[in-house]
Amino acid sequence: MALSNKQKQFLKSKAHDLKPVVLLGGNGLTEGVLAEIEQALDHHELIKVKVPGEDREQKVLVMDAIVRESKAEKVQVIGKTLVLYRPANEPKLQLPKA
């Protein structure tokens, strides 16, 4: 499911006030972290994930892995924060039409 620009703008505005619900620790991207992301997406649909690290290339690789493994859409990346969206079985957010 690809998001249109209009839908991304809508989701960015909704995500603006959110706090990161998942923070990657020193161990990086583990099975436990992926499970937390899955659970948060199932519950909230739209979440922020904080990915620490000074190496930009490594951070991008981790974020890409999170998007791939969670099967979510990357809405936005701001610094070390990744905004993800995945509709739940019973969607809470009503996206605008593309």
Image (cartoon, rainbow, N blue to C red):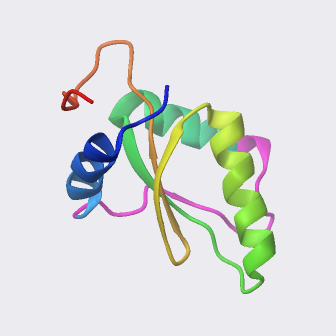
Q: Quadrant of residue 15?
A: bottom left
Q: Quadrant of residue 69?
A: top right
| Picture mark count | 0
Q: Give, as a single range, the part of the protein colored magenta.
A: 17-32
Inspect the magenta stretch and tell me whether residue 53 lies in it. Answer: no
Vertical arrangement, residue 20 with respect to residue 93, above or below: below
Vertical arrangement, residue 72 with respect to residue 25, above or below: above
In the image, is 98 to the left or to the right of 53? left
Note whether residue 55 is visible.
yes
Query: Which residue does the image show at 37% across and 31% down from the upper left?
Result: 43
Query: Percent x, y for residue 37?
Result: 56, 42
Query: Which residue does the image show at 65% across and 63% down from the upper left?
Result: 24
In the image, is 13 to the left or to the right of 68? left
Q: Which residue is outermost to the top?
A: 89
Query: Which residue does the image show at 22% across and 26% down from the upper left?
Result: 92
Query: Percent x, y for residue 74?
Result: 51, 48
In the image, is 40 to the left or to the right of 95? right
Q: Quadrant of residue 83?
A: bottom left
In the depicted view, which residue is nearer to us: 6 or 22?
6
In the depicted view, which residue is nearer to us: 62 or 96?
96
Query: Percent x, y for residue 60?
Result: 71, 66
In the depicted view, which residue is nearer to us: 44 or 26?
44
Q: Quadrant of the C terminus?
A: top left
Inspect the magenta stretch and tell me whether residue 21 lies in it. Answer: yes
Instruction: Name the chief secondary structure element in magenta.
Output: loop
Query: Percent x, y for residue 30?
Result: 78, 49
Q: Which residue is outermost to the bottom?
A: 54
In the image, is 66 to the left or to the right of 87? right
Note whether residue 33 is visible.
no
